[in-house]
Image (cartoon, rainbow, N blue to C red):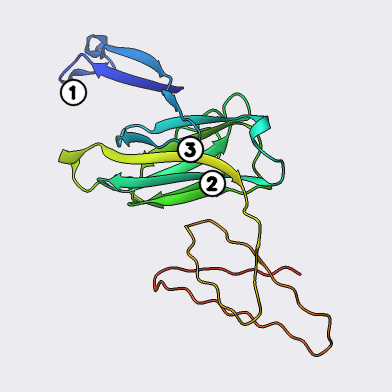
Amino acid sequence: MVVGIWLSNSLSVMSLFSAVDRSGETNYTIVATTISPPVTELVRNVTFKAFVQPEAYAHFRVDVPANTIVPGETHMMVHLSNVRGGVVDLFIHQGLGVGRNLAGGDEACVPANATCRTMDACNLVIEKCHFAPGTWYISVAVAREDDFTPLVNDYDRLPITFTLRANWMEDAAPQRLVAGIPVSKYIGEALYDFYVIDVPPTIDTWLFIELYAAACDTEVIMSILH
């Protein structure tokens, strides 16, 4: 809920006011308005086309039934794509009661669980150790500079349009690597590929892993657990 208050001045010449002459008092009217932002319900793994204006956020929600996840094994991914007309911020937040039914930004009461900023596309992942059934809220807003100027390409071509999709799934089973045989694959932003390798129990064996990424402007992180 957003509360807006405005004042209207009914006296055009403010210099007429005098501390002695009370006839110079300014009359005004005050109006308080409550606004409940609409929240659009998303369907699992169905792409939704929407838009956002600089003046307000676009809010969404998706319900995650408990019988559709495996606790500790299922993660959530929200894919924002086809952004046209400027830069947007994406927020995701778990609904946990009153005051937590909007995700991130100025219109929410608590920080988002995950965020990203893009002028094209991005993935946001809620890791399996933080993901739980229930209602999750997603918001999209026009991004702003430090001086609050909206990052819009052309004001005459507003609103900014985008597509949004939410889904949840279990991680794929690790792929077994064979020593000395390279594997070539691709990976999306904020996603993981998993591998496993067996090291023979000999005292003169050591493990050496090389990773090459065919993208000059992308960083890929590799982690190893024994």
Which three-letter amino acid code belongs to the residue tagged 2? Ala
Looking at the picture, does residue 217 appear above or below residue 93? below
Front label number (3 vs 2)? 3
Q: In the picture, residue 40 is in which quadrant?
A: top left
Q: Earlier in the sequence, mark 3 or mark 1?
A: 1
Residue 155, given in percent of the width and then of the height, sits at 19, 41
Q: Tell me which numbered mark, 3 or 2, is placed earlier along the sequence.
A: 3
User: Between marks 3 and 2, how big is the CA–CA gap?
Assistant: 19 Å
29 vs 50, nearest the viewer: 50
**Secondary structure at numbered mark 2:** strand
Looking at the rendered image, the disc whose residue lies closer to the viewer, 3 or 1, is: 3
User: For residue 23, what is the image quadrant?
Assistant: top left
On residue 114, the disc is 2
Q: Secondary structure at mark 1?
A: helix
Residue at the spot of label 1 = 15
The numbered mark, 1 or 2, whose residue comes first in the sequence reads 1
